[in-house]
Amino acid sequence: MRKIRAYQVLIGIFFIITATLYASCIPLYYDALLTQCISNGCGVSIPALTLAPGGLTLQETALLLVVIDCAYTLVFYSAALILLWKSGREPMGLLAALTMIAFGTSFPSLVMVGSTDSTFPHYWFLGVASVGWIAISLFCLLFPNGSFVPRWTRYVMALIVIVDIANVFYDGDLWDVLHVPQSLQLVWYLSTTLLLIYAQLHRFRRISSPEQRQQTKWVVYGVAICFVGFGLISILFDPAFHNGSATYFIYLNAALHLSLSALPVTLTLAVLRRRLWDINPLVNRTIVYGALTLCIVLLYTAVVLYLGNLFVTWNHYAVSLIATTLVAVVFAPLKEWLQRLVKRLMKGHHDDPYAVLLELGSQMMQPLAPDAMLAAIARQVQGALRLPYTAIAMDIEGQETILAEAGERKEGLELHAYPIIYRGKSIGTLYVASRSVGETFSSEDHIFLEVLLQQAGPIVNNADMLQGMRRLAEDLQDSREQLVLTREEERRRIRNNLHDDLAPRLAALALNVAIARKYVDKEPAVAVAKMDELGQVIRSTVQDIRSLVNDLRPPALDELGLIGAIRARMDEMAKPSQLSAEGTGAKPLQMQIDAPLVLPALRAAVEVAVYRIVTESMVNVVKHADATVCRVMLAVMEDSRLLVEVTDDGVGVGTVQLPALKKVPGGIGLISMRERAAEIGGECVIERLNTGGTRVRALLPLQ
């Protein structure tokens, strides 16, 4: 804090001394203009001027030149005072104020001409000029956070300080005294200027926050106006354009000082950081009106020169009148064309969404796949709004997936999401990246996106339907592959059982018959024993064959029907529970079934699925539920589906509801029930009841 206070005092003293010396030079400058500068010139500052008869007098010309310089300095001093008042406790604010004081003082011709005969003011202003260059260089390398970026620029800054301080000791003629060629002087000035620009660009792209980027935009805008204005107007000071007229020189001098006055205004806004308005519209209008002025001047000059050479005998007034009329006619269309061109260069076609829709519609008329249409929409949005990245995403199997994108997504750029609505339902999302960090979309951008998304809804819906058909085709292919694999696995199991078990037993039966036959006549008792062994093997083989057949389809379904088979299984499973309850005094498990008297004809696969789901559920109730009631219900629904429910009043399980054919945590029995329902196009849900217990609910198609 003490350092800041010391800097404030030093800058305040510097400001007072500089302003006092500046004020003392005003009458001296006015006298020099009257006695020497206007008539004979004062070096490179002011050339010799010609006063037109009936025009400005000598005193009026001198007064206007003094007023222009003083007004220029007053703008810089005002900016310095505002910075010292509002940002006097910030290092960058003090540095900006010092820059304003130095440049506002040293640039006008007033101080150099007015201090020619005074030693102290002359060298003081030379020092002020050096301070100005050092301060502006330091400001560009440190702004806005006060650190050197990149770090190696501090060494270049030290070299700039040495050169500018040395220039003071050589009376401002360092390069001439050292006989440095003008080409090297140009290289020095260009390299240092490019270094300052590089430092700000590097900081803008790599380090600055959104607010700091907005600050940098204002500084770059002010510097650009100064450089462009200084370059263009300085060309007009050349004797080839400058005819020595005092009026012409005053206009050029005023225009030059006005363009350079943009720096204190924009720099003050940037440093104060108060209400940093969006600078893009200002840049837009500057480019438009600058280009418009240039075009009008060129058009007027070309018409005057052409008609003047074509019709030499014509009056100059007539030629000027024709040129002015032509300029008036083309002004409005030219301005509109330039405005539209600049807008499209900066922000694309956001002001004409219907033209974009027309172009997009012409692309949609081509034989494109829905995926290619989505890519075309993404490219159209990116190109129309000049965005770095756009993408279209849709929800696929519960997960958002990007189906089309255009451009390259860069780190730090915020993604804005816009839902794509079709028939009142969100079917996708359009993601668009900001043009730069911290930049928001304008109302015109939002209108453009709203109009485009309304037209893009049907296209995205078609793509969604295509994705759904592809997923269905993939599921169908997976199901076919699964069925083929399951069938082949079943065939291999049956073949192995027949080959490895049944076939050797049948072969052994044939061998035992042959052996028994040999003992019939010789040893009847041995033959009888062999026949007994043979009968035992035959009964075992028959049992194995029955087991093999039962694995293919439960025999109870063919013998008793579906409901009868379920009742028989219930009775079989209820007996152990009743015997256990009699010994312990507990309440036995009651098995109940609620089914229509006659079920419609069921496919074999549906019968097996219902039987397996019901029996597996009852097994789980007996083993795990600790229930007293198990109720099975079968009902035919109106939509030609068979409802199967198995409920109990036991301890219950966690709520589970899973898509078909997806393996999830759970027992083998639970998974097999879901798989059996899914194989025939049904669904199976296992859930806990609010009143306690578990319900297995399956819906199976009858057709």
Image (cartoon, rainbow, N blue to C red):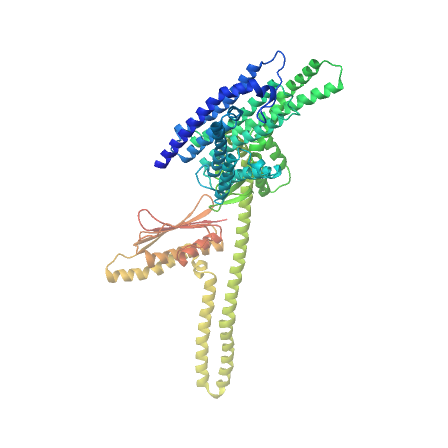
Vertical comparison of 469 with 529: above or below: above
Residue at position x 62%, y 28% in the image = 235
- Relative to residue 388, is residue 330 drawn left or right? right
Vertical comparison of 194 with 313: above or below: below
- Relative to residue 545, is residue 380 drawn left or right? right
* Position of residue 150 measured from the top left corner of the image (x, y, whole percent): 49, 44
* Position of residue 662 measured from the top left corner of the image (x, y, whole percent): 46, 53
Residue at position x 43%, y 35% in the image = 92
| Residue furthest out toward the bottom | 522
Q: Which one is in front, 131 or 463? A: 131
| Residue furthest out toward the top | 54
- Relative to residue 317, is residue 492 drawn left or right? left
Q: Is residue 611 visible to the viewer in this orientation of the structure?
A: no
Residue at position x 73%, y 19% in the image = 307
Q: Which one is in front, 421 or 14? A: 14
Q: Which one is in front, 682 or 554? A: 682
Q: Is residue 275 visible to the viewer in this orientation of the structure?
A: yes
Which corner quadrant holds the N terminus? top left
* Position of residue 286 measured from the top left corner of the image (x, y, whole percent): 55, 27
| Residue furthest out toward the left | 585
* Position of residue 607 measured from the top left corner of the image (x, y, whole percent): 46, 55
Q: How many numbered tags mark residues here?
A: 0
Residue at position x 69%, y 13% in the image = 317
Q: Which one is in front, 500 or 255? A: 255
